[in-house]
Image (spheres, helix red, strand yellow):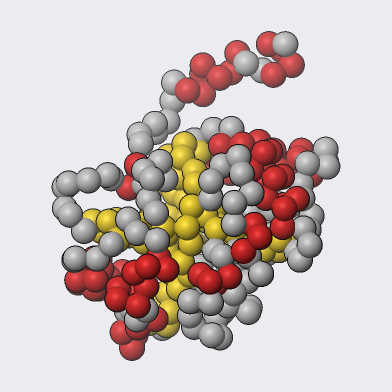
Amino acid sequence: MSEETRSDTYAELASVGPYGVRPGHALITMVEPHPGHEYAYNRWYEDDHYYAGAMAMPWMYAGRRWVATRELQELRVPEKSAVARPVTAGCYLSTYWITEGRYDDHMKWTVGINKRLNRDARVHQERTHVFTAFQDHEATVYRDGAAGPRDFHALDHPYAGLILQVVDAAAPEERATLLDHLRSRELPRRLAGSPAAMVTVFRPTPLPGDRMTYVKQVEGVDTRLTLLWFLEQDPAECWPTHFADLESLGGPAARVELVAPFIPTVPGTDLYVDRLR
């Protein structure tokens, strides 16, 4: 068995390279199961793919699944989104943290394992990838300063909701300015007194050329920022008072392409599957 799995190389690999806990990279994937396949998709993803296609991989150390019921889908803006067409598409969201400095190592494994899963008929085909991208961490802004969970805790802490927000700068050379504006001014202002404990900010990276064909290449690599708002309340309860105006985030120099609220799934159940349509 040692020769078959090359287990002798594991100790060598573990002894070199970064091994911190910072979420230096993320996989953020929003998917729409095809009508009539919602239950089958949920069971496949939760019972097999979440583990075999994600959490069992090297350097992917935390994960969380989220769901948007029809009620939450109808809160999304803008109506004409460059990310989701229609804007309600993508009722399941999965978020994963990858150890800082281990993106290339992880990508070699993930391409290889997904080819193997596909070859072994362990990939559910009745789904559409609406927004799937590996991302590099740019910033985390906390509501309560040094108190409370850190960003590396975020996918394990029992947050009650999450908002996925995608913002495009007007031009590639303006993204750094937009990031600085969000990090230093706008996000601290919006977090103060809100049910959101933190916002993590990422920028997307291109998918490898040998990616699976059912995953489209990432758009907006040079202009886009992806924000994850971690909420201590169900977004449906606090939307009008705190988050209904997120479409204006970034001001005139930016365009918000998606604001989409989610709640966590309950592992091992089909809770919410009957509320997607």
Residue 266 percent across, percent down from the top left = 53, 46
Answer above or below: position of 276 versus 16: below
Q: Quadrant of residue 2?
A: top right
26 and 221: which is toward the camera: 26
Residue 224 at least partly seen = no
Residue 194 percent across, percent down from the top left = 24, 65
Residue 15 percent across, percent down from the top left = 44, 21
Residue 88 at least partly seen = yes
The extreme bottom residue here reads 252
259 and 98: which is toward the camera: 259
Task: Look at 27% across and 44% down and name the residue there.
Answer: 149
Answer above or below: position of 190 versus 215: below
* Quarter of the figure with the N terminus: top right
Residue 202 relative to residue 148: left or right: right
Q: How many marks?
A: 0
Task: Look at 35% across and 34% down and name the residue there.
Answer: 20
Residue 134 relative to residue 122: left or right: left
Residue 107 relative to residue 154: left or right: right
Task: Look at 74% across and 16% down and name the residue there.
Answer: 4
98 and 84: which is toward the camera: 84
239 and 24: which is toward the camera: 239
* Quarter of the figure with the C terminus: bottom right
Task: Look at 21% across and 58% down and name the residue there.
Answer: 143
Residue 59 percent across, percent down from the top left = 49, 35
Q: Quadrant of residue 244?
A: bottom left
